[in-house]
Amino acid sequence: MKQLNFYKKNSLNNDQEVFSYFMETMISTNRTWEYFINWDKVFNGADKYRNELMKLNSLCGSLFPGEELKSLLKKNPDVVKAFPLLLAVRDESISLLESASLSDFKFYDYDFSKAPSKEEEIDLFVKFFKKSGLENLIRSKKITNIYDYVVGVEAGLDSNGRKNRGGTIMESLVKNILENIYHLDDSNFTDQGTPKKVKELWGIDLPVDKTSRRGDFIVNKNNKIYWIETNFYSAGGSKLKSTAGEYKALYNYFKQKNVQFIWITDGGGWKSAESAIEETFIATDYIFNLKMIQDRILDEVFI
């Protein structure tokens, strides 16, 4: 760990005190209002099949929705496009095993992008409607509007994106700090940096350990290149230990190439992986949290 005046100003006299400060000043969450649901994406997803869903709405309240679906498919076969979304599936084609108890494997292949035209094709989609539980769902009268139901499905699917949104929020927070506190701009820093991008911007050959490597931020300041990685962990898990090990190895690689490696990480998840990040913290020069960079610790690093 590199000793900085920032630590002395905060009365941190040794590695252990600096690490304790790092852990104690972490924030518990980086959630913003945008974290929960991307409503534009939800309604765009539902509206993509609005016409098909409105036609399927005629089945609501029916005692025999399977039979009525067969008649509907003869007139409007394109409604099958909406079937996967009714089951919270994004795929346009699905292969299904008839039964897990049969000795011989029998599969059914469904292509929902193609409207059925033959009687046997229609029967196959009616079978899908029944066996997947959609018929029972509609017959139960627990839903009265299929479009509204699909909005709920889309909201549920979108919740899976919260992990990615958490990472994006962290990058936005760091970018905002770099631009507004350290006054970096397009002339000396870029996000999602690659060797090709760095070469185009500054004519510098940036070494990387693998061609797919992409830095969250690359800074070109005072004749030095700084590679910055950011992440935020609200919860613990085995990934945190492997991440700490990966970044320790990345630091060692860049050190040999005369590239400064900075890791900005935060979140309460590190409380459960404290020993893993402590080892990397002590073994590398620059690991900071959001409060530390907000308090201008990078002023010393960028000299």
Image (spheres, rainbow, N blue to C red):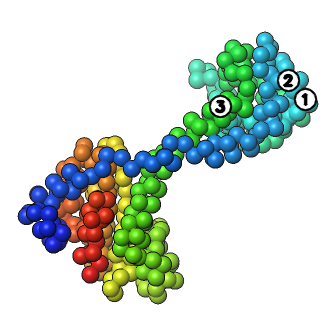
Expressed as whole percent of the image width and height from the top left, the position of residue 233 reads 35, 49
Give the total number of marks visible in the rendering: 3
Q: Earlier in the sequence, mark 2 or mark 3?
A: 2
Quadrant of the image occupied by residue 288 = bottom left
Quadrant of the image occupied by residue 208 = bottom left
Expressed as whole percent of the image width and height from the top left, the position of residue 31 reads 42, 47
Q: Looking at the rendering, in which quadrant would you find the C terminus?
A: bottom left
Name the mark on residue 70. Answer: 2
Which of 48/212 is in front?
48
Q: Contact, CB < 8 Å: mark 1 with mark 2?
A: yes
232 up-or-down from 120: above or below: below
Mark 1, residue position: 74
Expressed as whole percent of the image width and height from the top left, the position of residue 21 reads 17, 56
Residue found 62% across the figure and 32% down from its top: 152
Q: Amino acid at mark 3?
A: Leu
Mark 3, residue position: 87
Expressed as whole percent of the image width and height from the top left, the position of residue 282 reads 17, 62
Q: Contact, CB < 8 Å: mark 3 with mark 1?
A: no
Residue found 20% across the figure and 51% down from its top: 24
Residue found 77% across the figure and 16% down from its top: 61
**Helix, strand or loop at mark 1:** helix
Residue 299 seen in the figure: yes
Q: CA distance from mark 2 to mark 3?
A: 19 Å
